[in-house]
Image (tube, rainbow, N blue to C red):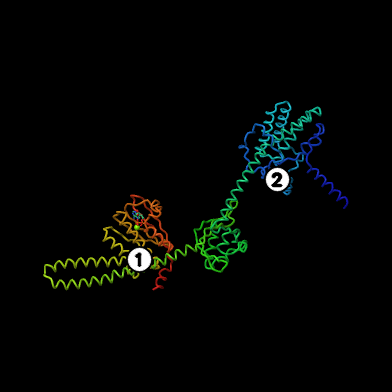
Amino acid sequence: MARRRQRRGAAAARAADRDAPARVAAPAGRSRRCAPAGALRLDRPGDAGRHADLRDGRDPERLRPRAAGPGRSAAAPGRLHPDALGPEDRRRARARRPVDGGHGVNPDVRELAAEYARALQGYLAGHGEAALQQAYEVGRQTLAKGLGVLDMATVQHWGLLRALAKSRTPQERSRALRAGQKLCVESLLPFEMAHRRVQEVNTALRDSEHRYRNLVDTARDVIYTLSSDGRLKTLNPVFETITGWSRTEWLGKAFAPLVYPDDLPRAAAMVQAVLAGQAPPMFELRILSRSGSYIPGEFMVTPQIHEGQIVGVLGVARDITDRQRADEALRHLNEALEEEIKRIAHALHDEAGQLLASVHIVLADIARELPTSSSQRLEEVRSLLNKIEEQLRHLSHELRPTILDDLGLQPALEFLADGVSKRTGLRISVAGTPGSRLPPATETALYRIVQEALTNVTRHAQAAHVAIAFSRNGHALCCSIQDDGAGFDVPTTRARRGQRGLGLMGIQERLNAVGGTLNIVSEPGRGTELLITVPVEATSADSHSARR
Ligand SMILES: Nc1ncnc2c1ncn2[C@@H]1O[C@H](COP(=O)(O)OP(=O)(O)O)[C@@H](O)[C@H]1O
Ligand SMILES: [Mg+2]
């Protein structure tokens, strides 16, 4: 037992000896014993890359040539050891240092040490500036070869040992030591410059991170991240403002209980899609607020990537309560407008029609009392009145065709096209079919959109032909209205704030209210095409019959 303790003590002592710093400032004759090549600690060549604290971002090729001038030797080697390194970092750095058990030393180090020794000799021979430049160059090459500060120390130690070995008197030795100090600083300059560069990069990184943080912290949309198992990893402050929850109540927890139960399958599918590397389109979810009500949100999600792997989901969510309210208000407004149009259409059709009928009766009475020549003139008036009646009837039907309610979109559009065609001479074709009956709001929106588009063609296009075509694409109904007229510059027209017409804007707003989209393809001289899509549910026919 005692012997085992003794052995352990001896082993510890050997290890402590290995870890003790090499002593080099010894008289020439003893230098081999005190610091033989095998006893010097060196960075293993492969270790260079691990000294990330000093070497990250190092680009030896870009290092400035040594600055001439008085300030250059002011650099203190001590600055090579960042204050930021704690005891643990130092312990790890020490552990990485290999003990070179006499199996030879990196040949680069030998070569550099010889060069360094030559610089030292040169300095002692009075070559001042040239020798300092040479020492700086040794430092630069040490860095360029991917070697570390510890290698540099070895190079310096060896160089100094050689110089000391050649010194014969104590005076020569102390001159060599003083020269060694100067060259030591010079050869460390490249390391210091590299270190400063790393610091600059770190500062730039910190600044950039600070800016990013600011952006996230002051964003008006909720920005969040999810782990791959659906837990909330981060949430920005606006989450609290919008939902009333404190972030700490949800961080680290599954997101699912925050989602309205009916929306959960969609939310889960989107997360899965992102984790599988897809980029799903925007989607809407209702989110539980602290008060218990649900807040409508529009979501955009993308993969969160770390070292090339998808590790979670990065999401941005916008509170669309106001937008939904505005859409709702617009829907009400459109409905009120439709009612008003209906009233005017009926007034035109029924009241004006009855008045005209009364005028016909009075004219017939007058005709009986007039001579035949005058009654012929009255006949002309009667025929003009008939034309007015016909026009009024047509107008009232166009304003709110009863066939839109009774027979649906296609017959109503054919009727509209026929009327516009007769009035303007424009050839208008209607191809394809919108399919089964659509919700009334969608049918009315499409009818009004085509009506406005035809008005635009007659007013602005000087076209000869308009083609209206319907097609179905899954759950979307597509409608194209294409003319062969003058065309126009779309971005310029759309940017004409304040003075632009209401027609295209009205089309867009009607589509917003029914969840549709508008795409305008036009160029001056090349005609115009409005491409419209509206979502249609498979149950639209049922819902239509249900409302009747
Ligand atoms: N089919 C078309 N052909 C040529 N120009 C068009 C067409 N449709 C729209 N425009 C252009 O777009 C502009 C905006 O149209 P709109 O919003 O309906 O307002 P408005 O018809 O009251 O001018 C029109 O003034 C016209 O210059
Ligand atoms: Mg218009």
Does the rendering let one see residue 413? yes
The residue lying toward the viewer, choosing from 79 and 191, is 79
- Residue 315 placed where, x, y %? 55, 58
Tell me the tag on residue 94: none
Q: Is residue 164 above or below residue 497?
A: above
Tell me the tag on residue 83: 2
Mark 1 Cα-neighbour bin, 10 Å: few <14, some 14–19, many ≥20: many
- Residue 513 placed where, x, y %? 43, 63
Label 2–label 1 contact, CB within 8 A: no
Amino acid tagged 2 = Asp
Ligand 2, by image quadrant, is: bottom left
Relative placement, left or right, of 320 versus 63 is left
User: Mark 2 falls on what kind of element?
Assistant: loop
Q: Is residue 256 above or below residue 40?
A: below
- Residue 227 placed where, x, y %? 60, 59
Tell me the tag on residue 409: 1
The residue lying toward the viewer, choosing from 490 and 303, is 490
